[in-house]
Image: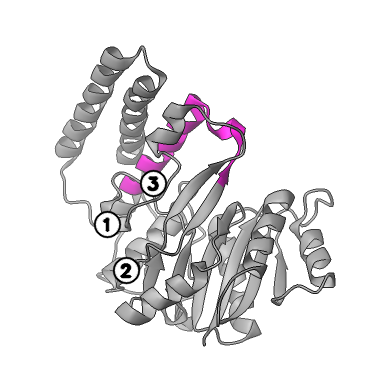
Amino acid sequence: MADVAICIKTHRQTFALRRVLKALGNLETVHRVTIIVGDTAADDAAGSGLGICRQVMQAGYRWPIIPVPLAHRNTARVRNAMLAAAFEAGAPVFVAFLDDRTVPETGWLDALVSEQRSTHADVVFGPTLAAFETKAPKWVASSGFFDRATPPDTWSDASVRLDNVLFKASVFGFERKPWFDPREAVVGLSDSLFVARARLEGADFQWAERARASRLIPGDEISPHKMCSAAHDAARIALTTRRIVDRYSETVAGEAWRIAKTMTQGALLYTALGWHPGGRFAGERRIWAAFGRLAALRGPISLPLRPDKPGVARPVS
Protein backbone atom coordinates (compact mmCIF):
# COMPACT_ATOMS: atom_id res chain seq x y z
CA MET A 1 0.00 0.00 0.00
CA ALA A 2 1.31 3.44 -0.94
CA ASP A 3 0.18 7.04 -0.63
CA VAL A 4 -0.60 8.54 -4.03
CA ALA A 5 -1.41 12.17 -4.81
CA ILE A 6 -3.45 12.58 -8.00
CA CYS A 7 -3.21 16.10 -9.46
CA ILE A 8 -5.92 17.42 -11.78
CA LYS A 9 -5.67 20.79 -13.52
CA THR A 10 -9.07 22.17 -14.49
CA HIS A 11 -10.50 25.26 -16.16
CA ARG A 12 -14.25 25.71 -16.60
CA GLN A 13 -14.82 21.99 -17.13
CA THR A 14 -17.38 21.32 -14.41
CA PHE A 15 -19.10 18.43 -16.17
CA ALA A 16 -15.81 16.79 -17.12
CA LEU A 17 -14.34 17.30 -13.64
CA ARG A 18 -17.35 15.70 -12.00
CA ARG A 19 -16.94 12.77 -14.40
CA VAL A 20 -13.27 12.34 -13.53
CA LEU A 21 -13.90 12.54 -9.78
CA LYS A 22 -16.63 9.90 -10.11
CA ALA A 23 -14.22 7.58 -11.90
CA LEU A 24 -11.54 8.13 -9.25
CA GLY A 25 -14.08 7.38 -6.55
CA ASN A 26 -14.72 4.03 -8.24
CA LEU A 27 -11.08 2.98 -8.44
CA GLU A 28 -10.33 -0.61 -7.46
CA THR A 29 -7.14 -0.01 -5.54
CA VAL A 30 -5.35 -0.93 -2.33
CA HIS A 31 -3.55 2.42 -2.23
CA ARG A 32 -4.36 5.55 -0.25
CA VAL A 33 -5.32 8.42 -2.52
CA THR A 34 -5.40 12.19 -2.09
CA ILE A 35 -6.78 14.28 -4.93
CA ILE A 36 -5.41 17.75 -5.67
CA VAL A 37 -7.56 19.94 -7.93
CA GLY A 38 -5.86 23.02 -9.38
CA ASP A 39 -8.75 25.27 -10.42
CA THR A 40 -7.80 28.16 -12.72
CA ALA A 41 -11.35 29.53 -12.85
CA ALA A 42 -11.87 29.90 -9.11
CA ASP A 43 -13.26 33.42 -9.54
CA ASP A 44 -15.96 32.21 -11.95
CA ALA A 45 -18.93 30.93 -9.94
CA ALA A 46 -20.49 29.23 -12.96
CA GLY A 47 -17.34 27.53 -14.15
CA SER A 48 -15.49 26.95 -10.90
CA GLY A 49 -14.25 23.50 -10.04
CA LEU A 50 -14.17 24.49 -6.37
CA GLY A 51 -17.94 24.25 -6.19
CA ILE A 52 -17.82 20.74 -7.67
CA CYS A 53 -15.19 19.72 -5.12
CA ARG A 54 -17.31 21.04 -2.25
CA GLN A 55 -20.43 19.25 -3.48
CA VAL A 56 -18.55 15.97 -3.90
CA MET A 57 -16.93 16.18 -0.47
CA GLN A 58 -20.23 17.06 1.24
CA ALA A 59 -21.76 13.96 -0.33
CA GLY A 60 -19.19 11.78 1.47
CA TYR A 61 -16.58 11.30 -1.22
CA ARG A 62 -14.26 8.34 -0.84
CA TRP A 63 -10.97 10.27 -1.01
CA PRO A 64 -9.81 13.54 0.53
CA ILE A 65 -9.80 16.40 -1.99
CA ILE A 66 -7.56 19.45 -1.70
CA PRO A 67 -8.81 22.31 -3.91
CA VAL A 68 -6.13 24.78 -5.03
CA PRO A 69 -7.70 28.01 -6.35
CA LEU A 70 -5.51 29.84 -8.86
CA ALA A 71 -5.78 33.17 -10.63
CA HIS A 72 -3.77 32.20 -13.72
CA ARG A 73 -3.65 29.46 -16.35
CA ASN A 74 0.11 29.05 -16.73
CA THR A 75 0.52 25.27 -16.80
CA ALA A 76 3.85 25.26 -14.99
CA ARG A 77 2.59 27.48 -12.14
CA VAL A 78 -0.52 25.35 -11.76
CA ARG A 79 1.50 22.12 -11.56
CA ASN A 80 3.90 23.70 -9.07
CA ALA A 81 1.00 24.82 -6.86
CA MET A 82 -0.60 21.36 -6.95
CA LEU A 83 2.69 19.67 -6.09
CA ALA A 84 3.28 22.08 -3.20
CA ALA A 85 -0.22 21.32 -1.86
CA ALA A 86 0.40 17.57 -2.21
CA PHE A 87 3.66 17.70 -0.27
CA GLU A 88 2.24 19.99 2.40
CA ALA A 89 -0.60 17.51 2.96
CA GLY A 90 1.73 14.59 3.57
CA ALA A 91 4.52 12.55 2.07
CA PRO A 92 3.16 10.79 -1.01
CA VAL A 93 5.23 7.98 -2.47
CA PHE A 94 3.85 8.67 -5.94
CA VAL A 95 2.36 11.64 -7.77
CA ALA A 96 0.01 11.12 -10.73
CA PHE A 97 -1.29 13.65 -13.22
CA LEU A 98 -4.63 13.55 -15.02
CA ASP A 99 -6.34 16.09 -17.26
CA ASP A 100 -9.80 17.16 -16.24
CA ARG A 101 -11.20 15.41 -19.31
CA THR A 102 -9.36 12.12 -18.81
CA VAL A 103 -11.32 9.32 -17.17
CA PRO A 104 -9.31 6.33 -15.86
CA GLU A 105 -10.54 2.75 -15.80
CA THR A 106 -11.14 1.13 -12.42
CA GLY A 107 -7.78 -0.68 -12.40
CA TRP A 108 -5.82 2.31 -13.67
CA LEU A 109 -3.92 3.30 -10.53
CA ASP A 110 -2.91 -0.21 -9.49
CA ALA A 111 -1.69 -0.89 -13.04
CA LEU A 112 0.58 2.17 -12.91
CA VAL A 113 1.95 1.34 -9.45
CA SER A 114 2.39 -2.34 -10.33
CA GLU A 115 4.45 -1.42 -13.41
CA GLN A 116 6.55 0.97 -11.36
CA ARG A 117 7.29 -1.63 -8.68
CA SER A 118 8.13 -4.38 -11.15
CA THR A 119 10.50 -2.17 -13.16
CA HIS A 120 11.61 0.36 -10.47
CA ALA A 121 10.83 3.10 -12.99
CA ASP A 122 10.86 6.77 -12.07
CA VAL A 123 8.03 7.61 -14.47
CA VAL A 124 5.23 5.42 -15.84
CA PHE A 125 2.91 6.47 -18.66
CA GLY A 126 -0.33 4.76 -19.64
CA PRO A 127 -2.39 4.75 -22.84
CA THR A 128 -5.07 7.38 -23.31
CA LEU A 129 -7.71 6.78 -25.97
CA ALA A 130 -10.17 9.29 -27.39
CA ALA A 131 -13.82 9.25 -26.32
CA PHE A 132 -15.71 11.61 -28.62
CA GLU A 133 -18.42 13.76 -27.08
CA THR A 134 -20.30 13.71 -30.38
CA LYS A 135 -20.09 11.18 -33.18
CA ALA A 136 -16.81 11.71 -35.02
CA PRO A 137 -16.28 11.06 -38.74
CA LYS A 138 -14.72 7.68 -39.44
CA TRP A 139 -11.54 9.24 -40.78
CA VAL A 140 -11.03 11.13 -37.49
CA ALA A 141 -11.47 8.03 -35.33
CA SER A 142 -9.28 5.85 -37.57
CA SER A 143 -6.49 8.46 -37.73
CA GLY A 144 -5.68 7.94 -34.04
CA PHE A 145 -4.86 11.65 -33.86
CA PHE A 146 -6.34 12.08 -30.39
CA ASP A 147 -5.01 8.80 -29.00
CA ARG A 148 -1.80 8.22 -27.06
CA ALA A 149 -1.62 4.48 -27.51
CA THR A 150 2.14 3.89 -27.75
CA PRO A 151 5.10 4.40 -25.38
CA PRO A 152 6.89 7.79 -25.35
CA ASP A 153 9.95 6.44 -27.17
CA THR A 154 7.80 5.91 -30.26
CA TRP A 155 6.32 9.42 -30.30
CA SER A 156 7.58 11.44 -33.25
CA ASP A 157 7.40 15.21 -33.57
CA ALA A 158 5.04 15.33 -30.63
CA SER A 159 4.96 17.25 -27.40
CA VAL A 160 4.64 15.39 -24.10
CA ARG A 161 1.50 16.11 -22.09
CA LEU A 162 1.51 15.01 -18.48
CA ASP A 163 -1.75 13.11 -18.55
CA ASN A 164 -2.18 9.53 -17.33
CA VAL A 165 1.30 9.46 -15.86
CA LEU A 166 2.76 8.40 -12.50
CA PHE A 167 5.96 9.80 -10.97
CA LYS A 168 7.95 8.65 -8.01
CA ALA A 169 7.68 11.56 -5.61
CA SER A 170 11.47 11.59 -5.29
CA VAL A 171 11.68 12.92 -8.86
CA PHE A 172 10.45 16.22 -7.43
CA GLY A 173 13.30 17.13 -5.09
CA PHE A 174 12.53 19.95 -2.68
CA GLU A 175 15.75 21.70 -3.63
CA ARG A 176 14.59 21.88 -7.25
CA LYS A 177 11.67 24.30 -6.85
CA PRO A 178 10.10 25.50 -9.03
CA TRP A 179 9.72 21.99 -10.43
CA PHE A 180 8.18 23.25 -13.67
CA ASP A 181 9.67 26.34 -15.27
CA PRO A 182 6.92 28.99 -15.53
CA ARG A 183 8.71 30.95 -18.25
CA GLU A 184 6.88 29.16 -21.03
CA ALA A 185 8.02 30.37 -24.44
CA VAL A 186 5.21 28.27 -25.95
CA VAL A 187 1.97 27.20 -24.27
CA GLY A 188 2.40 23.59 -23.12
CA LEU A 189 6.20 23.68 -23.28
CA SER A 190 6.82 23.15 -19.56
CA ASP A 191 5.62 19.51 -19.55
CA SER A 192 7.94 18.55 -22.40
CA LEU A 193 10.83 20.38 -20.76
CA PHE A 194 10.30 18.62 -17.45
CA VAL A 195 10.26 15.19 -19.11
CA ALA A 196 13.33 16.02 -21.18
CA ARG A 197 15.21 17.17 -18.10
CA ALA A 198 14.27 14.00 -16.23
CA ARG A 199 15.51 11.87 -19.14
CA LEU A 200 18.84 13.70 -19.24
CA GLU A 201 19.29 13.18 -15.54
CA GLY A 202 18.82 9.43 -15.87
CA ALA A 203 15.15 8.91 -15.01
CA ASP A 204 13.79 5.56 -16.18
CA PHE A 205 10.54 5.69 -18.16
CA GLN A 206 8.16 2.76 -18.54
CA TRP A 207 4.81 2.06 -20.18
CA ALA A 208 1.88 0.40 -18.40
CA GLU A 209 -0.38 -1.02 -21.09
CA ARG A 210 -3.11 -1.91 -18.58
CA ALA A 211 -3.28 1.62 -17.10
CA ARG A 212 -5.93 2.73 -19.57
CA ALA A 213 -7.88 5.96 -19.58
CA SER A 214 -10.21 7.71 -22.00
CA ARG A 215 -10.01 11.40 -22.89
CA LEU A 216 -13.22 13.27 -23.68
CA ILE A 217 -12.91 15.11 -27.02
CA PRO A 218 -15.52 17.87 -27.55
CA GLY A 219 -17.11 18.16 -30.96
CA ASP A 220 -15.51 21.54 -31.68
CA GLU A 221 -12.02 20.01 -31.44
CA ILE A 222 -12.43 17.59 -34.32
CA SER A 223 -12.45 20.17 -37.10
CA PRO A 224 -9.54 19.79 -39.57
CA HIS A 225 -8.36 23.32 -38.80
CA LYS A 226 -8.13 22.75 -35.05
CA MET A 227 -6.48 19.35 -35.53
CA CYS A 228 -3.89 20.83 -37.88
CA SER A 229 -3.28 23.68 -35.44
CA ALA A 230 -2.68 21.09 -32.70
CA ALA A 231 -0.21 19.26 -34.97
CA HIS A 232 1.61 22.57 -35.56
CA ASP A 233 1.87 23.28 -31.83
CA ALA A 234 3.03 19.75 -30.99
CA ALA A 235 5.81 19.85 -33.58
CA ARG A 236 6.87 23.30 -32.44
CA ILE A 237 7.04 22.20 -28.80
CA ALA A 238 8.97 19.04 -29.69
CA LEU A 239 11.71 20.89 -31.57
CA THR A 240 11.79 23.78 -29.10
CA THR A 241 12.37 21.26 -26.30
CA ARG A 242 15.23 19.64 -28.23
CA ARG A 243 16.86 23.02 -28.73
CA ILE A 244 16.58 24.03 -25.08
CA VAL A 245 17.91 20.78 -23.62
CA ASP A 246 20.80 20.69 -26.12
CA ARG A 247 19.74 17.53 -27.86
CA TYR A 248 19.58 19.46 -31.06
CA SER A 249 22.25 17.66 -33.09
CA GLU A 250 21.23 18.67 -36.61
CA THR A 251 22.53 21.79 -38.33
CA VAL A 252 20.10 24.49 -39.36
CA ALA A 253 20.55 23.36 -42.96
CA GLY A 254 19.80 19.75 -41.99
CA GLU A 255 16.65 20.72 -40.12
CA ALA A 256 15.57 22.99 -42.96
CA TRP A 257 15.96 20.04 -45.34
CA ARG A 258 13.84 17.90 -43.05
CA ILE A 259 11.16 20.58 -42.91
CA ALA A 260 11.15 20.91 -46.70
CA LYS A 261 10.91 17.13 -47.07
CA THR A 262 7.94 16.98 -44.69
CA MET A 263 6.20 19.79 -46.55
CA THR A 264 6.76 18.01 -49.87
CA GLN A 265 5.38 14.75 -48.48
CA GLY A 266 2.35 16.61 -47.16
CA ALA A 267 1.75 18.34 -50.49
CA LEU A 268 2.00 15.03 -52.37
CA LEU A 269 -0.44 13.36 -49.99
CA TYR A 270 -2.83 16.26 -50.27
CA THR A 271 -2.65 16.15 -54.06
CA ALA A 272 -3.01 12.38 -54.34
CA LEU A 273 -5.63 11.84 -51.66
CA GLY A 274 -7.30 15.23 -51.43
CA TRP A 275 -10.59 13.73 -52.59
CA HIS A 276 -10.89 11.92 -49.24
CA PRO A 277 -11.12 13.94 -45.99
CA GLY A 278 -8.76 11.56 -44.20
CA GLY A 279 -6.18 11.75 -46.97
CA ARG A 280 -6.53 15.51 -47.14
CA PHE A 281 -5.95 15.77 -43.39
CA ALA A 282 -2.90 13.47 -43.57
CA GLY A 283 -1.32 15.88 -46.03
CA GLU A 284 -2.36 19.02 -44.18
CA ARG A 285 -1.16 17.57 -40.90
CA ARG A 286 2.37 17.13 -42.27
CA ILE A 287 2.41 20.61 -43.75
CA TRP A 288 1.25 22.22 -40.51
CA ALA A 289 3.76 20.18 -38.49
CA ALA A 290 6.51 21.37 -40.82
CA PHE A 291 5.48 24.98 -40.21
CA GLY A 292 5.53 24.24 -36.47
CA ARG A 293 9.11 23.01 -36.71
CA LEU A 294 9.97 26.08 -38.77
CA ALA A 295 8.52 28.32 -36.04
CA ALA A 296 10.67 26.52 -33.46
CA LEU A 297 13.75 26.81 -35.66
CA ARG A 298 13.29 30.53 -36.24
CA GLY A 299 12.12 31.44 -32.75
CA PRO A 300 14.63 32.76 -30.20
CA ILE A 301 15.34 30.41 -27.32
CA SER A 302 16.40 32.03 -24.05
CA LEU A 303 14.87 29.66 -21.53
CA PRO A 304 17.53 27.77 -19.55
CA LEU A 305 16.24 24.41 -18.40
CA ARG A 306 18.15 24.12 -15.14
CA PRO A 307 20.55 27.02 -14.64
CA ASP A 308 21.80 25.65 -11.31
CA LYS A 309 22.99 22.36 -12.92
CA PRO A 310 25.64 23.23 -15.52
CA GLY A 311 26.06 20.69 -18.29
CA VAL A 312 22.46 19.49 -18.19
CA ALA A 313 21.12 22.12 -20.55
CA ARG A 314 21.98 25.51 -21.88
CA PRO A 315 20.09 28.22 -23.78
CA VAL A 316 20.22 28.22 -27.54
CA SER A 317 20.23 31.57 -29.29
Nearer the observer, 11 or 120: 120
Identify the residue shown where x is 32% and y is 68%: 206
Pointer 3 or 1: first along the chain? 1
Way the structure is coloured:
one colour
Q: Which residue is mark 2?
A: 205
Seen in the image, is 2 located left or right of residue 36? left
- Whole-angstrom CA distance, mark 3 to mark 1, is 16 Å
Crowding at dot 1, Cα within 10 Å, few <14 / some 14-19 / many 20+, comes out as few
Foreground residue, 69 or 17? 17
Q: Position of residue 29 (x, y in %)?
A: 55, 77
Q: Position of residue 228 (x, y in %)?
A: 43, 30
Magenta residues? 216-239
User: Which x, y percent locates residue 75?
Assistant: 55, 56
Q: Looking at the image, is mark 2 or mark 1 earlier in the sequence? A: 1
- Residue type at mark 1 is Asp
| Secondary structure character of the magenta stretch overall | helix
Residue contact between numbered discs 3 and 1, judged by CB atoms under 8 Å: no
